[in-house]
Image: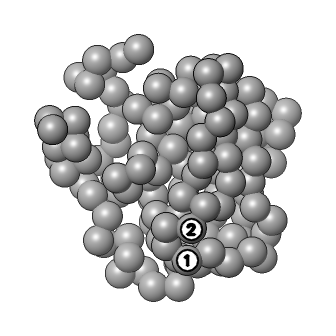
């Protein structure tokens, strides 16, 4: 497992306390799991994602990630409607391990309230979670 100093934590994303990230792209928000989350899970072997058109409130479970170690729930860092899912993960769920902020993204959401994104953590605040 990586040391905290070895984690890849981009500046252009916002972080949730349960280790999802968001990146705003136009009027949509891309969501995935952080480098920390994928590192803790180990080799990801299956990802269960919602259907396009499904809507979730902030904090609701929207899917699961299964690794060789465990199954972990995925929680919505913001509320909104699913407008796309990363279908490449069906054939290659390990993309989440290799590129959690790139090809390993999970879903795209049309946010119900864009201000929920601003309430998420920046990189410094997310790193602060590990100081406890």
Give the quarter of the image for residue 36. Answer: top left
Say what secondary structure mark 2 lies in. Answer: loop
The residue at 35%/81% (across/down) is 115
Vertical side of 88 occupied by 2: above or below: above
Residue matched to label 2: 60
Q: Position of residue 117 (x, y in %)?
A: 38, 70
The residue at 45%/58% (across/down) is 22
Asked whether the viewer can see residue 93, the reply is: no
The residue at 47%/24% (across/down) is 39
The residue at 41%/14% (across/down) is 1
Say what secondary structure mark 1 lies in. Answer: loop
The quadrant the C terminus occupies is top left
Asked whether the viewer can see residue 75, the reply is: yes
Vertical side of 87 occupied by 50: above or below: below
Residue 57 disc label: 1
Q: Position of residue 2 (x, y in %)?
A: 36, 17
At label 1, counting other C-alpha atoms closer than 10 Å, the crowd grade (few under 14, some 14-19, many 20 or more) is: some
Q: Position of residue 53 (x, y in %)?
A: 77, 76
Q: Residue placed farthest to the top in the image?
A: 1
Vertical side of 107 occupied by 79: above or below: below
């Amino acid at each position: 497992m990586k040391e905290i100093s070895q984690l890849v934590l981009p500046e252009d994303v916002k972080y949730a306390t349960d280790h999802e990230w968001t990146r705003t792209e136009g009027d949509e928000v891309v969501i995935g799991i952080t480098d920390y989350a994928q590192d803790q899970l180990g080799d990801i072997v299956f990802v269960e994602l919602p259907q396009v058109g499904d809507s979730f409130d902030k904090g609701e479970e929207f899917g699961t990630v299964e690794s060789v170690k465990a199954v972990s729930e995925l929680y919505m860092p913001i509320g909104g409607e699913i407008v796309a899912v990363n279908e490449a993960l069906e054939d290659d769920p390990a993309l989440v391990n290799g590129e959690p902020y790139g090809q390993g993204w999970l879903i795209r959401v049309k946010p119900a309230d864009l201000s929920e994104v601003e309430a998420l953590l920046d990189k410094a605040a997310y790193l602060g979670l590990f100081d406890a």
